[in-house]
Image (cartoon, rainbow, N blue to C red):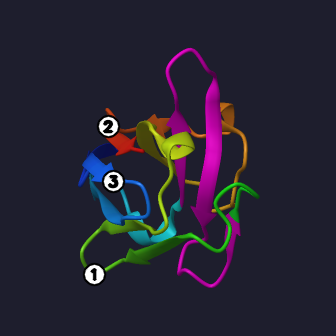
Amino acid sequence: QVQLVESGGGLVQAGGSLRLSCAASGGTFGSYALGWFRQAPGKGREFVAAISRIGAFTRYADSVRGRFTISRDNAKNTVYLQMNSLNAEDTAVYYCAADPTGVIRLRGDEYPYWGQGTQVTVSS
């Protein structure tokens, strides 16, 4: 069983930056593909970014490409989401997810393990 714990959320002004972290325990972190998703109030869960097992491949949603960067440190069992140039539309609860098959997934229902989420609020 894999446990994921997100941190780093908070309140930031538009144009600002935040870095989210997701620490994993249990399982073999280096074999997992990892993803970040978000859910804004009244909306469905949305794919944000994903990264392959050793970080060689990444994928981004069009809405965040060029502003957000996903990375991982397998020695620390942690995945990160660096978020720059934030705007009000980025306000959401952000979740990390893990897929032990190691394949990058864009659909949330393909990830079996999830964290509890961290709130990001961008004030305009």
Which residue is identified by label 3? 13
Question: Which residue is disc 2 drawn over?
Answer: 119
- In the rendered view of the protein, which quadrant contains the N terminus? top left
- How far apart marks 2 and 1 lie (CA) works out to 26 Å
As rendered, which of 111 and 44 lies closer to the eye?
Answer: 44
Q: Give the crowd class for mark 2: few <14, some 14-19, many >=20 residues within 10 Å.
A: some
- Whether residue 51 is in magenta: the answer is yes
Q: Residue type at mark 3?
A: Gln
Which corner quadrant of the image does residue 72 belong to?
bottom left
Q: Residue at x 55, y 80 (%)?
A: 55
- Mark 1, residue position: 75
Residue 1 visible, this orientation: no
Image location of residue 52, percent across then percent down: 61, 71
Residue at image location 66% in from the left, 31% down from the top: 109
Q: How far from the left and from the top, in percent, is residue 113?
A: 45, 38
CA neighbours of label 1 inside 10 A, class few (<14), some (14 to 19), many (20+): few
Q: Is residue 10 above or below residue 93?
A: below
Of badges 1 and 3, nearer the viewer stands 3
Secondary element at image label 1: loop
Quarter of the image for the C terminus: give it.
Answer: top left
